[in-house]
Amino acid sequence: MTATVPGTGTFAQEWEEWHRQKEAVLASPHGFLAVTALVWLDEQPTAVPGAPGLWSAGEQGVVVTLADGEQLVVDGTPVTGEHVFGHLGLRESVLSTSGDTAVEVAERGGRYVVRLRDPRSPLRLGYPGTPAYPADPRWAVPGRFVAFDAPRPTPVPGVLEGVQHVYDAPGRIEFELEGRQLSLTAFPGHTPGALSVLFSDETSGRTTYAFRSLQLPPPDADGSVLVDLNRAANLPCAYTDLATCPTPPAENRLPLAVEAGEKTPLGRGVGRPTDRGAVLEV
């Protein structure tokens, strides 16, 4: 089936539902607005403020040692003493819970990190919602996925100093917008066959955050895919410093103002990732 622009009768309604669902996930009790601490792990056991135990990463992968009276719930089962999470795959995350707080263990840029997700986060409780441009069908255009001969390992810096991400880019998205022939390098999406694009444009740093993401469905057999820039979305780093987001490849800057999708958030959490303890959001 060839990608087509949705009919204008339901276009705005479909966009509103997409944005509503995205906002609900972001502001959920353990969504990214709930992150209050980020601690990088190494072989030296260290505490994560607000979480039980001492955490480390070594030959066994991630290990937490819980003191008497402390426990975590992992996969629905309470654990005490020493618990080995083991080695995590590329960009893998695992959630455990302590009371109503989620304790996330994740691999990012070749290192292990623990993040605390507390429903009482000031950022979450005071969240005013994310502003966005009105949905406009002119920003939804047919595109074509052009696969590379083989996936290209593509390193991109993370927003945190010293963190670098590497993605196997499967190809690029080609499309025409405002009379210009454009292309964007695509990374694998969140589901099989789906694509993810990180890009900046002439609104970046003005009305929108420094860069945004666009999730695309699996292309049709002929490579056709709808490029709907109304669904250009903020990454977690637009809301807080306690994020490890990748930045766009250098070639993914569009030479025009994409006045579509999400704008710069109205509020931002204050926090500083650390290697020994963490500064919480205020």
Image (cartoon, rainbow, N blue to C red):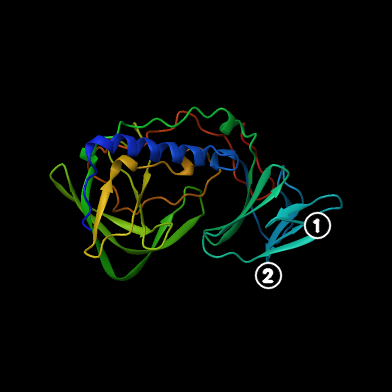
Residue 49, relative to residue 143: is it above or below? above
Residue 23, relative to residue 90: is it above or below? above
Between disc 2 and disc 1, whose residue precedes?
2
Kindly report which numbered mark, 2 or 1, lies closer to the viewer in this rendering: 1
Q: Secondary structure at mark 2?
A: loop
Q: Is residue 209 visible?
A: no
**Rendered-image quadrant of the N terminus:** bottom left
Between 227 and 6, the residue placed more toward the observer is: 6
Tell me residue 244's x, y (percent): 51, 49
Tell me residue 107's x, y (percent): 57, 59
Q: Is residue 121 visible?
A: yes
Between 197 and 231, the residue placed more toward the observer is: 231
Which residue is labeled 2 in the image?
Answer: 59
Residue kind at label 2, given as amino acid type: Glu
Side of 239 relative to 271 (left or right) = left
Which residue is labeled 1 in the image?
Answer: 80
Residue kind at label 1, given as amino acid type: Thr
Tell me residue 79's x, y (percent): 77, 57
* Residue at (24% x, 40% y) in the render: 139
**Rendered-image quadrant of the C terminus:** top right
